[in-house]
Amino acid sequence: MPVARTEVAIVGAGPAGLLLGRLLGNAGIETVVLELRDRDHVEHRQRAGILEQATMDVLEAAGVGARMVRERLLHDGVELRFGGAGHRVDLHGLTGRRVAIYAQTEVVKDLVAARLEAGVPLDFEVSDVAVSGLDTDAPTVTYTHDGERVELRCEVVAGCDGFHGACRQAIPEAAMTVVERDYPFAWLGILAQVAPSSPELIYANHEDGFALASMRSPEISRLYVQCDAADELEAWSEDRIWAALHTRLATDDGWTLREGPVLDSSITPMRSHVASPLRHGRLFLAGDAGHIVPPTGAKGLNLAVADVTVLAAALIDHLHHGDDAGIDAYSDRALDRVWRCEHFSWWMTAMLHRFPGADGFDRALQRSQLDYLAASEAARTSLAENYVGLPL
């Protein structure tokens, strides 16, 4: 079996793994990034589309933000829509910060291109990944690539390979505490070839269920409707999807939703999940490998960036200076932010969705919260501060 060596083995070529590799590479630390899927899949799977100000700052500082700066759509606010009327939350006016529309697919493309241009190892379509020696100073990652079994020896393993990845599974069950919540609904999302119907995102609470009007570009709209957690795509024709969007996003002032050809559709389950700690020996988890948030708060990608920003600084101190304070504190520091985002995402989800079995009392509580946001600058400021993201 061939033996390779590196300082940090990164499993997973999503935003977390690729950005960690970039940050460490900029500091002169050797990394190898391994990914189960092929490049086309990694660069085109539809995921998040909202970047916090801190995320944009990290990408620019890492030297991978030039195209983002050119093409992003900066947003100063969002709209909450309920009772047939819209209520704008002035994100920039309340916090001094903005968010941007720039799809995760584009972030990944930028990171892949930068890594390939730098000529550092990035292996797609690896299989049978196994992690061992985590309690030693010399962990190993073994995997198959191009039909050959490889042993990669390293000093640190970064598990950025998601909830079902090999890294998470390598941690003994007794060494990890998991808390989670599954929601009794999902999001059916579509990409449509039509200009957005609103210049800013619309989050709608309606008696039929939640809806969200977003975008990916000036020509492409991204739209979602709440559906049953057990629904299959086949149960939702394009006519049914558009009808639900028209109903749930309707206003009393005659606002019109634009329709266009559907380019892609998918159903996303809604769940909250946190594993603790995010470290086991020389293995560090980041992104979806350690935590999942419902998409209502737009926190998934941004949390992954926050994780690896903290982890990269800690690993640089450890590998360059022999200072272990950062890696020892990594899990606690990352989880502090994770739980703030878990709470915000849960709160947004609970306020905007229809829950099976909800009675008149539940619906009145939702409406009271929405009315309070519409009337109170203090309440809107709290929402805005969490939505644009806390500073890193």
Image (cartoon, grey):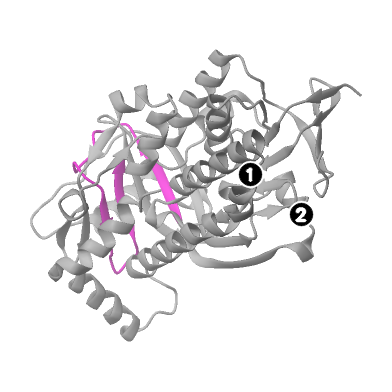
Across and down, in percent, residue 125 comes to 70, 27
State the residue position of label 2.
171
- Looking at numbered disc 2 in the image, what kind of residue is underneath it? Ile
Horizontally, residue 336 falls left or right of residue 21, namely: left
Bounds of the magenta span? 187-215
At numbered mark 1, what does the secondary structure look like: helix, strand or loop?
loop
Tell me which corner region of the image, top left, top right, bottom left or bottom right, holds residue 94: bottom left
Task: Find out whether residue 193 is within the magenta segment.
Answer: yes
Crowd band around label 2 with a 10 angstrom C-alpha radius: few (<14), some (14–19), many (20+):
some
Quick check: 126 above or below 238? above
State the residue position of label 1.
323
Quick check: 171 above or below 144? below
Task: Find out whether residue 349 is within the magenta segment.
Answer: no
Q: Is residue 197 visible?
A: yes
In which quadrant will I find the N terminus? top right
As drawn, the residue found furthest toward the right would be 1
Indicate which disc residue 341 carries: none
Across and down, in percent, residue 235 comes to 48, 52
- Looking at numbered disc 1 in the image, what kind of residue is underneath it? Asp
